Structure formats: C-alpha cells, structure tokens
C-alpha cells in the first residue's frame, strides 16, 4: 500500500532551503578509533558537547542541500561527521542528532539500505515485518540512550530521582566506591525516564530518506517555531512505532485529508487547548518543562 501524495508538510520553506549539513571533517588515519558517541553520551559526569549543540558554523567545504535529500550525506558517509552530529553508525543504521530539534533531546535513526531508505515509512513499517522488528530493537536501545541523557541533564532537578541521587552520592563518597555494575544493582531505580521518550515517523515526511524520530516529550526547543512543527509531533501526524503495522483502513495513510497540521494546538502534558495561539503555547511549554523535569 502506498500513501497518496499529500500536500501537507511539517517543514518550513526556510528549513528546506537551509538544511545545511556540516561538511566532512579531516579523516582519521586508518586504524585510529573513532570515539564512541554512545559511551560519551552515557558518561554521567563529564563535561562534553551538549547533544543538541548547533551545527558547526558554515565552512568553505560544507554541503548545502537545497532539497529534501539532506539526510543522504549521513547515510553515505557517516564517518565524515563529528560525534556532535553523528552519534553512531553500523552497516545497517546511522543515528544522528536532528539538525532542528523539536524537543530538548531529538535523534533520528536512519536505515542505510537504499531499498528501505527510499520507501515511504508507513509502507516500509507496515509491509516489511523483518524491517519493523529490526527497527523495534534499535528504537528500544535508543529510547534507553535518550532516557539516560534526560537523567544526566535533569536528574538533579527531579523529585523522583532524589533517593537515587542521594544513594549515588553516598556510594561515591565511600572509601571503597562500587563498580558501575555494582552501583546499578544497589541504587534505587529512580525515575523511569523512558516514559518521557517517544519514537515514530511522520505520516507525510518532509525529508525523502526514511527516518525515525526518537524524541523527548518536552517540546522545549528554540527550533520549535510554529503550529506545523508542534502538531507534527502531537497529533495523528506522528505515528508511534508501537502502532505498526497499520491496517489498510487506518486514516493516517491520508494525513492531508485528516488535516492534522491545521488542528488546534493542545499541550502535550495537560491537554490545554491553545487553538492557533502559538506564542501563548510557547510560554506554556516553558512552564510545563519546569514542572515535568521536577517530577
Ligand atoms: Zn521527519
Ligand atoms: Zn499544559
């Protein structure tokens, strides 16, 4: 089944023409190990580049994609990008930070197989069960990664992480601090940050290469600039991985007909309806961000 071409899009014209991908950095000599961005991201207390760091300033050798194919460069040569952009890559997948994050943590999972990459996500995830299960496995790992990043950033503010943080502090102050594995076994579990992470695809993607969004629920980001941005993650336009495979009668095959992006904007947390008032929603999102991270 192929979705009808719909004339509804979550990306703005400005974004499309300025999808600038930082160009290849100097290549590492052969055999030199690339730093593992996963381990970097997991390290609890080391200063490092924030994962949502803005792209490198434009340089002479950058690539500019004036089209919807801006994700192709990551798929073709992931090793040429810095770890601040490409988090990890394997033969099958590349994981990157979204160039225009719509929440405080926002990753994209990109399958590298060209036959999948060029397929509409609703079709690929509904008709290729082996692909769907591979995606589910990757998404589980990435949700865990985003969850630990949320804990690293916001755990100190979180009431439900307090007991864990206190126990951690105590353990680290002892004369014989436990190993990481011992620590994990003895600490209280604390807040379940995975509950604050969503994974899914857009019913009408703005970029041509198949990609899966793994995004924290907060919608707290300067890149979230209009109703389309907001609604593309908070209406039926966003199809969670758990909902696949979709059956033929599912209305989300026809996102344009459903008019998701033009719907009233409702707070992701309390459901308050902001209708079309985006500025008021933005103020409210900032308040909700505080409430959410303190939970
Ligand atoms: Zn997308
Ligand atoms: Zn609210």
Image (spheres, grey):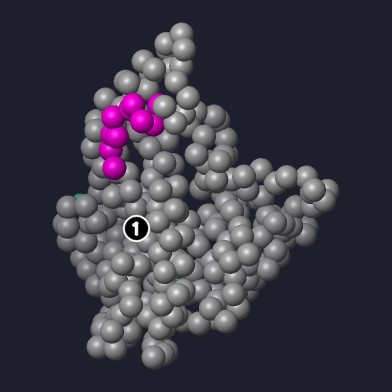
* Residue 88 x, y percent position in the rendering: 59, 53
Q: Alpha-carbon neighbours of circle 1 within 10 Å: few (<14), some, or many (≥20)? A: many
- Say if residue 70 shows up in the picture: no
Is the C-beta of the residue carrying label 1 under 8 Å from the nearest atom of ligand 1? no
Instruction: Give the number of marks.
Output: 1
Q: Is the magenta stretch mostly helix, strand or loop?
A: loop
* Residue 257 x, y percent position in the rendering: 29, 86
**Quadrant where the C terminus lies?**
top left
Is 14 inside the magenta-drawn segment? no
**Quadrant where the N terminus lies?**
bottom left
Is 187 inside the magenta-drawn segment? yes
Please indicate whether residue 28 sits to the left or right of residue 192 in the image.
Answer: right
Q: Which residue is drawn at 42% across and 69% down?
A: 133
Q: Is mark 1 on a helix, strand or loop?
A: strand
Q: Above or below — where is 3 with respect to 272?
A: below
* Residue 123 x, y percent position in the rendering: 42, 83
Q: Magenta region: which residues?
A: 183-192
Residue lying farthest to the top in this orientation:
175
Q: Which residue is drawn at 37% across and 77% down?
A: 203
Q: Which residue is drawn at 24% across and 64% down?
A: 265
Residue at the spot of label 1: 198
Q: Above or below — where is 276 with respect to 163?
A: below
- Say if residue 97 shows up in the picture: yes
Please indicate whether residue 52 sits to the left or right of residue 247 in the image.
Answer: right
Q: Residue at x 53, y 54 (%)?
A: 97
* Residue 78 x, y percent position in the rendering: 66, 60
**Residue 189 found in image quarter:** top left
Please indicate whether residue 279 sits to the left or right of residue 137 in the image.
Answer: left
Q: Which of the pair 225/157 is nearer the observer?
A: 157
Q: Above or below — where is 153 with respect to 12?
A: above
**Residue 235 found in image quarter:** bottom left
């Amino acid at each position: 089944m192929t979705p009808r071409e719909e004339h509804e899009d979550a990306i703005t014209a400005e974004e499309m023409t300025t999808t600038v991908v930082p160009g290849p950095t100097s290549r590492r000599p052969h055999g030199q190990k690339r730093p593992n961005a996963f381990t970097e991201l997991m390290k609890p207390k080391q200063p490092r580049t924030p994962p949502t760091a803005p792209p490198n300033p434009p340089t002479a050798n950058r690539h500019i994609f004036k089209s919807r194919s801006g994700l192709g460069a990551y798929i073709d040569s992931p090793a040429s990008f810095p770890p601040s952009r490409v988090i990890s890559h394997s033969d099958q997948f590349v994981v990157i930070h979204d160039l225009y994050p719509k929440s405080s943590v926002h990753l994209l999972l990109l399958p590298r197989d060209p036959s999948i990459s060029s397929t509409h996500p609703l079709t690929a995830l509904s008709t290729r069960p082996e692909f769907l299960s591979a995606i589910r496995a990757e998404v589980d790992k990435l949700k865990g990664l985003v969850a630990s990043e949320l804990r690293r950033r916001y755990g100190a503010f979180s009431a439900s992480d307090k007991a864990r943080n206190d126990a951690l502090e105590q353990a680290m102050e002892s004369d014989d601090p436990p190993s990481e594995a011992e620590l994990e076994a003895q600490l209280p579990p604390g807040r379940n940050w995975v509950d604050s992470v969503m994974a899914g695809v857009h019913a009408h993607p703005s970029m041509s290469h198949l990609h899966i969004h793994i995004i924290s629920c907060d919608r707290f980001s300067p890149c979230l600039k209009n109703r389309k941005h907001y609604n593309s993650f908070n209406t039926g336009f966003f199809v969670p991985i758990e909902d696949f495979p979709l059956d033929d009668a599912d209305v989300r095959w026809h996102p344009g007909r459903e008019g998701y992006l033009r719907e009233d904007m409702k707070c992701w947390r309390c459901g308050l309806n902001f209708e079309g008032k985006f500025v008021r929603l933005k103020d409210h999102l900032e308040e909700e961000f505080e409430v959410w991270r303190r939970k």
